[in-house]
Image: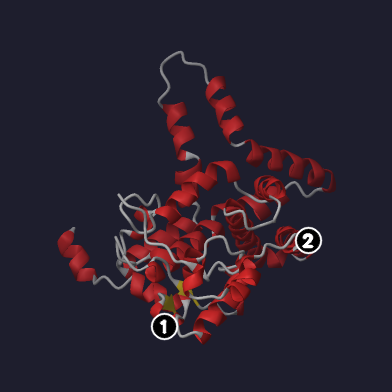
């Protein structure tokens, strides 16, 4: 299968215009990572001082967990820092993902975007779906069922299906090693907070956002980016969708300019903080109307859930 068509920046920008867009800052990327953790700590402190704000803190923290994953995604493109060693260290150790495992997978997504070999094609292939189906998916996300299925159901199945007499410890040891960052964070956080009577901080203010709000907004982000985009789409300006995000959406759903996804697919090594400028320049050049975009996340969700219920019932 041939790779997806690519965009040549020279088709739209002069060298003088392109250079600032492609430039990687030595401080902005790390500062954004620090910002993500600072927001998480501030939201956690708010919840400790005013427990009534715990639901709000869960949404804020879940959004910044996604934000840190987005910054790890930038590191996968070498866009978080001009020094690749620093880029990889920050992306692998100060965000919430495994950069080295993620990078080859994600670059495969860019190479074959919306083509048969795109490893993310399954995320967009089912759409459009019915509103009932979308509501069920969101309910599974917010109740932790999606998180359990993706993160823990395999381990439970291994434990349940082990042969008679097979020891449990090797399975648990392997699970801990595979999730060492998760368990290390748990141990360190509980050790620091438990002496102050705050043992509940890690499960309530880290695990609950990770298991509920994060899966839901990850799903909504995936829908906005690629749902209802044609398989084998030949136009590189329509491999992904950019979605306008208001202030609340940027805070709770689309942090760190992740909504500029068409621009990201067009110029995948441009740092996330330059994507708004790239969009403004493309608008000025009259290119933006040719790109796939949406005026709001609500509009994308309407499109993605536009399959009639009666058709779904007949098909079932």
| Front-most of residues 12 and 37 | 12
In the depicted structure, whether residue 88 falls above or below residue 56: above
Instruction: Identify residue for label 2.
Output: 45
Residue drawn at point x = 30 percent, y = 49 percent: 1
User: What percent of the width, then of the height, locates residue 188?
Assistant: 76, 41
Q: Quadrant of residue 255?
A: bottom right
| Front-most of residues 106 and 167 | 106
Q: Secondary structure at mark 1?
A: helix
Q: Residue furthest front?
A: 15
In the depicted structure, whether residue 110 falls above or below residue 237: above
Query: Would residue 94 be visible to someone looking at this image?
Result: no
User: What percent of the width, then of the height, locates residue 207?
Assistant: 62, 50
User: What percent of the width, then of the height, locates residue 89?
Assistant: 70, 45
The tag earlier along the polypeptide, 1 or 2, is 2
Instruction: Identify residue for label 1.
Output: 289
Q: Residues within 10 Å of mark 2 (few under 14, many from 20)?
A: some
Q: Quadrant of residue 38?
A: bottom right
């Amino acid at each position: 299968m041939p790779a997806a068509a690519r965009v040549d920046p020279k088709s739209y920008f002069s060298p003088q215009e392109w250079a600032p867009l492609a430039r990687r800052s030595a401080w902005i990327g790390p500062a954004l990572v620090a910002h993500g953790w600072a927001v998480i700590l501030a939201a956690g402190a708010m919840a400790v001082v005013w427990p009534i704000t715990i639901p709000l803190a869960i949404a804020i923290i879940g959004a910044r967990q996604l934000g840190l994953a987005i910054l790890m995604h930038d590191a996968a493109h070498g866009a978080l820092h001009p020094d690749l060693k620093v880029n990889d260290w920050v992306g692998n150790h100060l965000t919430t993902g495994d950069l080295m495992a993620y990078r080859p997978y994600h670059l495969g997504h860019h190479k074959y975007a919306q083509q048969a070999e795109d490893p993310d094609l399954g995320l967009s292939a089912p759409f459009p779906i019915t509103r009932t189906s979308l509501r069920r998916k969101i309910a599974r996300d917010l109740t932790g069922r999606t998180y359990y299925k993706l993160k823990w159901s395999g381990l439970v199945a291994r434990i349940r299906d082990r042969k008679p007499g097979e020891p449990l410890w090797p399975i648990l040891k392997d699970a801990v090693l595979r999730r060492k960052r998760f368990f290390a964070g748990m141990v360190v956080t509980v050790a620091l907070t438990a002496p102050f009577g705050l043992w509940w901080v890690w499960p309530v203010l880290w695990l609950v956002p990770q298991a509920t709000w994060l899966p839901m907004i990850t799903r909504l982000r995936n829908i906005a980016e690629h749902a209802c985009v044609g398989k084998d789409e030949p136009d590189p300006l329509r491999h992904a969708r950019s979605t306008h995000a208001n202030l609340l959406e940027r805070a709770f759903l689309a942090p760190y300019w992740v909504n500029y996804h068409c621009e990201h697919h067009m110029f995948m090594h441009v740092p996330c903080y330059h994507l708004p400028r790239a969009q403004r320049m493309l608008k000025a050049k009259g290119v933006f109307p040719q790109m796939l975009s949406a005026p709001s996340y609500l509009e994308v969700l309407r499109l993605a859930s536009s399959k009639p219920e009666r058709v779904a019932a007949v098909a079932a």
